[in-house]
Amino acid sequence: MESISKELKVSALENGTVLDHIPAENVYKALDILNLKGIENQITIGINLNSKLYGKKGIIKIADRFFEDDELNKLALIAPHATVNIIRNFQVVEKKQLTMPDRIEGIASCMNPKCITNHQPVKTKFSVVNENGKISLVCHYCEKQSEIIFK
Amino acid sequence: MMKKSLISIQDFSKEEILHVLEVAKEFEKNRSRNILEGKVIACIFFEPSTRTRLSFETAVNRLGAKVIGFSDASNTSVSKGETLKDTIKMVSNYVDMIIMRHPLEGSSRYASEVSSVPVVNAGDGANQHPSQTLLDMYSIMQTQGKLDGLTINMVGDLKYGRTTHSLLQAMSHFDTEFIFTAPDELKMPVEYKDFLKEKGIRYTETDSLEEHLNDCDILYMTRVQQERFTDPMEYEKVKNVYRLDASMLKNVRPGMKILHPLPRVNEIDQDVDDTPYAYYFKQAENGLYVRMAIISCLLGYR
């Protein structure tokens, strides 16, 4: 059984990207952050899969789609321990860890109700602050520091 | 010197701050200089202000440039729903510099990104007001003869008071010791105390105005600003928490000066005005020289 389930989870992809070890509750956010809603590629999503390391995990497999590191690193905000597998011809040709980005644009909202970004069509920009593993954002515009709020 | 915008006091290095303060000294000696003749500068105020607007407009006039602008957004296209971006794009095509006040935080930073000319932030909501910080520093330098080795006692609303936050950031370039005098409800936020710790700068906290009155060089008083409170009950509790009067000043340091960004309500009694320690009106006057310096430095004329 073990070998069958392994095959179903990972090797079904001929070419594409497998994002593994996403916290189960953040899988939908990950789809948002990578802008995967509405694309035509075949996407397989697993949520609440058993994981020896994390208890429950999520996995996203996207066929025929490869990402720039900058795009993938945004995921570190919600899945710092995620792994990225690049699949070509059913083989894992590359395995990557994510790096926390210094700055992010567009994907989060500022929590300050008086911030210009919440009143005018301004693309949000934040610098990422990592204080002993606790991630927060400092707004480039109003200079307020807050937790991450996704759009 | 530097063709750029002034949005946050953190945009200026220690050297740039000192340069602006030196240039301000020149203007204090001679306040009418036509070095910007032929320039046009926009003062666009989306929110009411007396002191800041009048001193900026005076500074522009005394430098020989012309002022255009508005002091109330309700008579402009903003009331028709024009975005800030469009207003700034349009104005920056007409002028050599934009001086702007706006109630939304971060609005000036955004304006500087869409403008083709330098933008000076004259206050963006509760966020930044860098010309106030520079005039505070100028007043400290002029009264104490130095910026290093001073003890600054900040009093009043240290939670919402943007002037205290910016002054703290700017003075962290120098060897400063801080005293924070505030009631529990209005204490200096943790992020600023952490900032000082990181920089190795000493501070003490108290809720008693008397406690450290006699061991500071600068007493920086602030008003408890009603407009920053969301809960009126909270405001009522703290609005009259500190009142300084002349009888309390008997044992202060001889060179101690009292600063206040103004307007004051009743945190400083009128009988303090005639003591040698009162400096707040002269401080407001200094705003003119410092703003002349900011404008001419940002336009590359000093």
Image: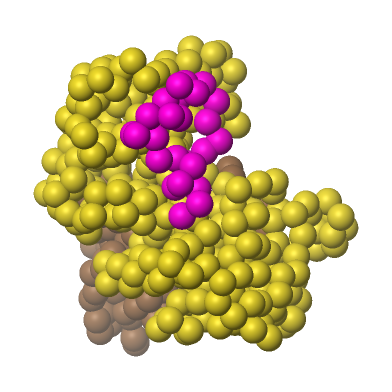
Report whether B102 appears left or right of B6: right
Quarter of the figure with the C terminus of chain B: bottom left
Q: Give me the residue at 69% from left, 78% from top.
A: B40
Relative to B277, residue B67 above or below: below
Chain A as rendered: colour:
brown
Q: Give me the residue at 38% from left, 76% from top.
A: A70
| Viewer-nearest residue: B44 or B89 | B44
Report whether B130 appears left or right of B173: right
The question of residue A50 being in magenta is answered with no
Q: Main secondary structure of the magenta part?
A: loop
Quarter location, residue B227? top right
Relative image position of residue B20 (x, y in whole percent): 38, 69
Chain B as rendered: colour:
yellow
Report whether B289 appears left or right of B213: right
Relative image position of residue B6 (x, y in whole percent): 48, 67
Relative image position of residue B15 (x, y in whole percent): 27, 72
Task: Magenta stretch: give its range.
Answer: B261-286
| Viewer-nearest residue: B267 or A136 | B267
Q: Is residue A66 visible?
A: no
Q: Give me the residue at 56% from left, 72% from top.
A: B32
Report whether B38 appears left or right of B294: right
